[in-house]
Amino acid sequence: RHGGGGLKSLPVPTVIGHRGASGYRPEHTFGSYELALDLGADIVEAGDLVPTKDGHLVCRHEPEIGGTTDVADHPEFAGRRTTKVLDGVSTTGWFTEDFTLAELKTLRAVERIPAARQHNTVYDGRWEIPTFEEVLRWQDEQTRRRGRQVWIYPETKHPTYFRKLGLGLEERLTRILRRHGKDGKDSPVIIQSFEPSSIQRLNKLVGNPLVVLLSSAGSRPWDFVEAGDPRTVADLITPKGLEQIASYAQGIGPTLDLVIPRDAQGNLTEPSTLVADAHAAGLILHPWTMRNENTFLPADFRKGTDPTAYGDVFGAFATYFATGIDGVFTD
Ligand code: G3P
Ligand code: CA
């Protein structure tokens, strides 16, 4: 442990169940969340948050739900299938913001990648889409049942896109957290986002432990694109950039590649200075994502695509933990 309250009271290295235990159950379901705790996760990423038409927050990785629910099997929703431009990408399917919560509750979750995770498909149709309110009640129940504080790690998804639609995620999230007494810096709810402006807004509104997610070095957060800000992730992870992040966040969630870059052949090279630089700025690091199917992992650490037949997964964790990271997102 780091010692201290809030984020610093977490065990280190912290194991974060990515979309629950999504290697073993359809992601963002209570089956997936609960198994993550059974398998020893310290925190559950519950969930990636997107809004409904009537303003509720639900747990889906993205608003388009064609790949993670049985919506295509519901003839009554056939007319809702549409094409939208989401953060610059044309996307066809069904979108949570076009459904009321009551309508979404008639759907059931299915496995996103059945080809790689065939074993998960036996659970298709078993669980509803969770709301964030339900997650907060589940967190309390699990904390009581397990006799330890269960942490959750929700993410605001596409916040600029939803703000433009009049569905601001941060205000909704803040209201819900306050209602449940889970606002403030000592809350066991860590909020993450790829858009720094969402984290800045949440820092002012609710002050929970906050983490800025970072994609590949050349990428630009979507709020930067919309604002005409030319900075890339590479600019954010300079010592000066990290100091700025530390003025409104407690941590960063970089890709594993930013922690240990790979050469042209895909082999791991020496760790970058990111861990030392982020720690010098007072930021914790929770990189993503450790999983069998992840091409970020070198082939030595993988064994086909069957998560029940990992290769040297302990070697993979040990290699990254040796860099000094504070935890890791894993499926
Ligand atoms: O927060 C780590 C990870 O969740 C970010 O990636 O795409 O799974 O939301 P993604
Ligand atoms: Ca996420």
Image (tube, helix red, strand yellow):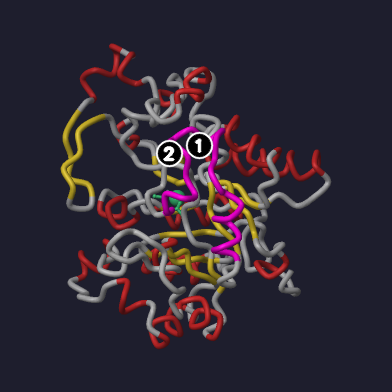
The crowding category of the residue bearing disc 1, from other C-alpha atoms within 10 Å (few below 14, some 14 to 19, many at least 20), is: many
Give the residue type that dot 2 points to.
Arg
181 left or right of 146 in image: left
Mark sitting earlier along the chain (1/2): 1
* Residue plotted at (55% across, 49% down): 176
The quadrant of the image that shows the N terminus is: bottom right
Marks 2 and 1: in contact by CB < 8 Å?
yes
Q: Is residue 98 above or below residue 122?
A: below
In this orientation, which residue lies closer to the viewer: 212 or 57? 212
Span of residues in magenta: 297-321
Disc 2: which residue:
60
Q: Picture coordinates of residue 288 (x, y %)?
A: 47, 56
Q: Residue furthest top?
A: 75
| The stretch drawn in magenta includes residue 129 | no
Q: Which residue bears the numbered disc 1?
A: 28
Above or below for 164 versus 134: below
Residue 299 lies, with reference to residue 34, above or below; the image says below
Residue 161 lies, in percent from the top left, at 27, 52
Name which residue lies at 54% across and 86% down: 280
Q: Nearer the viewer, residue 263 or 71?
A: 263
In three-dimensional space, the C-alpha distance between marks 1 and 2, rounded to whole angstroms, equals 6 Å
